Image (cartoon, rainbow, N blue to C red):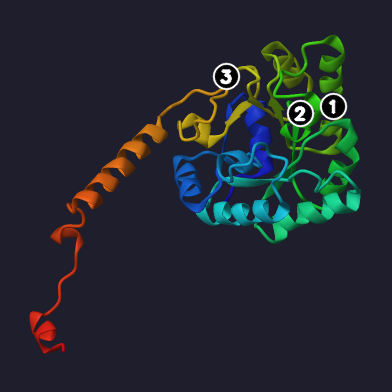
Amino acid sequence: MRVSINEIKEMKQKGEKITMLTAYDYSTAKIVDEVGIPLVLVGDSLGMVVLGYESTIPVTMAEMLHHTKTVVRGTKHAMVIGDMPFMTYHVTTEDAMRNAARFIQEAGAQAIKLEGGVTVAEKVKRIVECGIPVMGHLGLTPQSILQFGGYKIQGRTPEVAQKLLEDARALEQAGVFAIVLETVPAPLAALVTQKISVPTIGIGAGPGCDGQVQVIHDILGWFTDFVPKHTKQYAKLHDVMSTAIAEYYKDVKAGSFPTEKQSFTMDESILARLK
């Protein structure tokens, strides 16, 4: 059985911290699931850490569905959440509902995530009414990075802080089962967490949230173009992989790989009959 939205809500009620990680492929998702991570997000961050885009904005619906399918195949217990990409839910409610349904029907996800507060609340409500669980996303919303003028902390002024709280309440009323708070001052994130009944999942929002999410490439030291301040590197896969690949390159050039151990044999009499 996969983790349900009710289980996630109960974790907040019990004071049990919620862990979420991103995954973008079968092999990674399989490991994350085996560890017991309850929430796996197929984030549009794949645009940067997997596809090499400069931001999440170029990511397409086709790309998101493709990667979500692979993650679903790699998991058995975790709830897989598909991240709705830029402009797939912004124009009309019908677009939002149709594209959300594609994540569930075509990709096999169990929930979707979208960015925004009051402005998307009605769309969230309609999607939830269709039976699709929705996770919200407030604070630094990467799809709005051009409007923000860069990756900046959100909520440091009274006006922006008040708006974030109002957005969180609007999403709660619309029926989200959880809200991601990204790059928000820790005291504000803690206050929002106290003020709403649904779980908050922080990324750069301090320890006061109900849970935490990180991009797996960041915590593994796999993506090194930049390291976010909110990340703790639990490994340095880039260095491990670089060393291993360099050794392979050296062995092939030197003719020391492959050896008999990595080769297959055949009956010598067959070779003798070949003309």
- Residue 9 falls left or right of residue 128: left
For numbered disc 1, what is the local secondary structure?
helix
Q: Residue at x 13, y 85 (%)?
A: 270
Residue 109 appears in view = no
Q: In whole angstroms, how far apart are the C-alphas of marks 3 and 2? A: 18 Å
Q: Residue at x 84, y 42 (%)?
A: 124
Amino acid type, callout 3: Lys
Which tag, 3 or 2, sits closer to the chain's start?
Answer: 2
Amino acid type, callout 2: Leu
Mark 3, Cα crowd under 10 Å, few <14 / some 14-19 / many 20+, is: few
For numbered disc 3, what is the local secondary structure?
loop
Q: In whole angstroms, how far apart are the C-alphas of marks 1 and 2? A: 8 Å
Q: Are marks 1 and 2 in contact (CB under 8 Å)?
A: yes
Mark in front: 3 vs 2: 3
Q: Residue at x 44, y 45 (%)?
A: 31
Task: In this rendered view, identify the residue nearer to me: 76 or 52.
Answer: 52
Which tag, 1 or 3, sits closer to the chain's start?
Answer: 1
- Residue 245 falls left or right of residue 186: left
Query: Residue 122, percent across and down?
Result: 90, 40
Please determine whether, in this image, residue 1 is positioned above or below residue 195.
below
Check disc 2 and report the residue beneath it: 138
Mark in front: 1 vs 3: 3
Which tag, 1 or 2, sits closer to the chain's start?
Answer: 2
Image quadrant for the C terminus? bottom left
Mark 1, Cα crowd under 10 Å, few <14 / some 14-19 / many 20+, is: many
Check disc 1 and report the residue beneath it: 167
Task: In this rendered view, identify the residue nearer to me: 108 or 219.
Answer: 219
